[in-house]
Image (tube, helix red, strand yellow):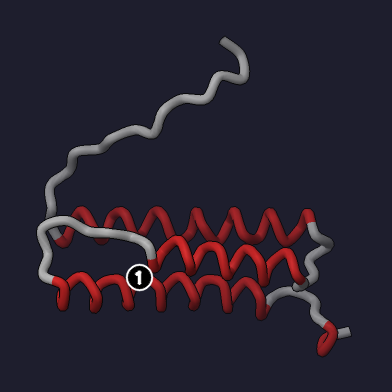
Amino acid sequence: MMGERKPFRRIDFPQSIASYQAITAIALPALRTVLEELAEAHGNKAGPWLDDLEARLIRDAKGTITEGASIEVEAASLKVGIDVLQMTLDVVRHNLVGEEKQ
């Protein structure tokens, strides 16, 4: 049926460094592309839309739960993931026209 939402796909994959490298190599550029498309829709200007999106993405990332890892490993891994997310947002924000660039 048109407009029908599909459920999330469950993906079983080898829990290996190579798998995580492939996920990262694909997901990060995809995220940046999506952010850049959103920025274009907002006139390539930073503003509350980006601040709100950033806050939501980081909040959601902090709520991530992993399985099969100790609390220490999970916390360190999530910190790296959040740092990379923040870096990606910072790069997009840097490339936008803001008050300081006008």
Q: Residue furthest top?
A: 1
- Say whether residue 54 is left or right of residue 15: right
Label 1: which residue? 81
**Residue 83, image quadrant:** bottom left
- Say whether residue 66 is left or right of residue 49: left
**Could you tell me residue 62's position as x and y percent?**
39, 68
- Say whether residue 94 is left or right of residue 33: right
Count of picture labels: 1
**Could you tell me residue 7's position as x and y percent?**
41, 28
> Alpha-carbon neighbours of circle 1 within 10 Å: few (<14), some, or many (≥20)?
some
Q: Which quadrant of the figure contains the C terminus?
A: bottom right
The three-letter code of the residue at mark 1 reads Gly
**Could you tell me residue 26's position as x and y percent?**
39, 54
> What's the residue at 52%, 25% (across, down)?
5
Compared to 92, does 39 lie above or below? above
> What's the residue at 49%, 77% (across, down)?
87
